[in-house]
Every structure is written in C-alpha cells, then in structure tokens.
C-alpha cells in the first residue's frame, strides 16, 4: 500500500492509497491519512486495522528501480519426445518407452528425480489435408515434455546432448536464475533507497527545506532472468558432431521501491 500527494487547483492537497480512503486537507495544517488493511488473524477471519500517517510539511513520493547484475547459479531446461502410431494406445505405449529412456538418461547425468518434472503430455489425431478433398486420417501423435532443474549450470550442454542422444525431438531453454537472490536484492534495496532519499532531499532543498524524513516505503520485485530461448527442434545428430556450448552470462535481479518523504526544516 502506498501514498501519492495530489495538489488541486484551489491549493489544497489530497492523499490517496489503494482506493480505500481519501481525505482532503489544507497544506498548512496537519496531514492525516487513514488506511485500512486486512490482517489475517490466527485461525480466524481477517480483521480490520487502521494505519495513520501524519505530516506537518509537504511530502514527495519517489519511485526507484535498482537492479544488480550477477552470474546465475541455476538453470531450467525442458525437452520431450514425440511418437506416432496408427492407434492412440499404440502411440502412448511407444512414447512411454521413449520417455522412460530419456528420464533414465537424465538420472545417469547426476540429476535427481525431484528435479525432473513432467511439463505436459498431449495426444492428437493427425490428418493429411488434401486440396478439394476430405482430410485423410493418418494416426495419432503423442508428445511428452519434462522440465529439468540444473544446479550445476556447467553441465547444461552435456545434458542437452544426452537428451538428444536418448531420443529428444524438441528442447526448450535454458532459463537462468538464482537459487537464493536475497543478498543481491539486499544490495539493490540499499542502492534504491539511497537514490530515493537523495532525490527527495534535492526536492526539499529546491523548495527551501533542509531535509526529509520517511513516511512510508513499499517494495516490488523485478525479474531475475532473461527472456527464455525459443524452442529448438532437434534432428538426428552425427556421432562426431561438436558438443553443445552454453554461455550463462549474467542476469539481473533487483527491487522497485516507492518511498514517501516529508520535507523537514
């Protein structure tokens, strides 16, 4: 929940927050804005509480986003197999055998079972479409995809190659991230607040005030990874083909904060 200060044409000012309560006040008098929050009671229904913020002087709200670039330490990839047969049951059986082979290959690569998750299984009838004629039914196709969480990102290339060797017909990823981004966000939060305070202090001095004091802070989290790579269709690989190379680079993690300051003498 956050505050904004809006000045009306008659010189009066108004706080508002989350469309809960608004109160119009005179700028030269004490500012008092009440906000209602739902607070979950232990084992019971939500109860209402009121938070009051008072200010004697003008206020300014600063919004800042700060990100830290750092090397990722985890990655996610996904891959699957497609199988076709004349009947749905036959297609499912063929696909089950192929997927079982892929999962065993992943486990042999040192990936724990809890880091392997089925992402989707699809069964669809297949048709051959002919001009000016009824589509010809050709059988069924099953696709089965698993997502894999890799805690050793140096193994991404070898895992992708192993999946293809085990029969993967499509791959997605990698998506890079941080297993624990608390320290990175702590750095970003400190920088963001320092920037917000410096900007608010500049505004205060430009309007004849000496400094500022914090009235309220709210925070949001920014993304911690890049846009995922597009799906890669896989064809049969030559045994002498070069190994897949993957560069993790760096990712960004950070915070967005909104800080309301009161100007002080």
Image (tube, rainbow, N blue to C red):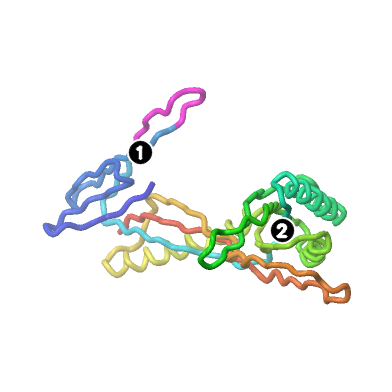
Task: Write down the quadrant of residue 67 in the picture.
Answer: bottom right
The quadrant the C terminus occupies is: bottom left
Kind of element beneath mark 1 = strand
Q: Whole-percent x and y of residue 201?
A: 37, 64
Taking 115 as reference, is 216 left or right?
A: left
Q: Give me the residue at 47% from left, 27% from top.
A: 41
Q: Whole-percent x and y of residue 258?
A: 41, 56
Q: Whole-percent x and y of residue 254?
A: 55, 60
Q: Whole-percent x and y of residue 256?
A: 47, 59
Farthest residue to the top: give it. Answer: 44
Q: Give me the residue at 49% from left, 62% from top.
A: 192
Kind of element beneath mark 2 = strand
Which of the labelled discs sits on residue 51, or is there none? 1
Q: Give me the residue at 77% from left, 64% from top.
A: 160
Along the line of sight, the residue nearer the viewer: 129 or 34: 129
Q: Give me the residue at 75% from left, 69% from top.
A: 235
Taking 261 as reference, is 137 left or right?
A: right
Along the line of sight, the residue nearer the viewer: 218 or 32: 218
Label 1 – label 2 distance at C-alpha: 50 Å
Taking 230 as reference, is 49 left or right?
A: left
Q: Tell me which segment is drawn in magenta.
A: 40-51
């Amino acid at each position: 929940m956050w505050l904004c200060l809006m000045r009306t044409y008659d010189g009066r000012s108004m706080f508002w927050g989350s469309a809960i309560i608004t109160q119009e006040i005179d700028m030269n008098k004490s500012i008092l804005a009440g906000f209602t929050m739902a607070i979950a009671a232990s084992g019971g229904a939500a109860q209402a509480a009121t938070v009051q913020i008072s200010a004697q002087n003008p206020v300014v709200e600063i919004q800042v986003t700060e990100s830290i670039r750092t090397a990722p330490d985890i990655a996610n990839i996904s891959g699957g197999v497609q199988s076709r047969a004349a009947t749905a049951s036959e297609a499912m059986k063929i696909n089950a055998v192929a997927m079982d082979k892929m999962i065993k290959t992943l486990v042999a690569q040192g990936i724990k079972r809890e880091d392997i998750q089925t992402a989707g299984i699809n069964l669809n009838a297949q048709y051959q479409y002919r001009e000016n004629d009824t589509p010809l039914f050709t059988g069924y196709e099953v696709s089965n995809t698993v997502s894999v969480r890799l805690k050793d990102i140096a193994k991404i290339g070898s895992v992708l190659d192993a999946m293809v060797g085990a029969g993967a017909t499509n791959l997605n990823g990698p998506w890079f991230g941080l297993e624990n981004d608390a320290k990175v966000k702590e750095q970003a939060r400190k920088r963001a607040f320092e920037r917000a305070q410096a900007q608010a202090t500049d505004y205060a001095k430009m309007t004849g005030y000496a400094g500022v004091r914090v009235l309220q802070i709210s925070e949001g989290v920014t993304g911690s990874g890049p846009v995922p790579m597009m799906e890669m269709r896989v064809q049969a690989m030559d045994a002498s083909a070069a190994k897949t190379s993957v560069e993790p680079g760096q990712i960004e993690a950070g915070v967005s904060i909104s800080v309301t300051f009161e100007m002080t003498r």
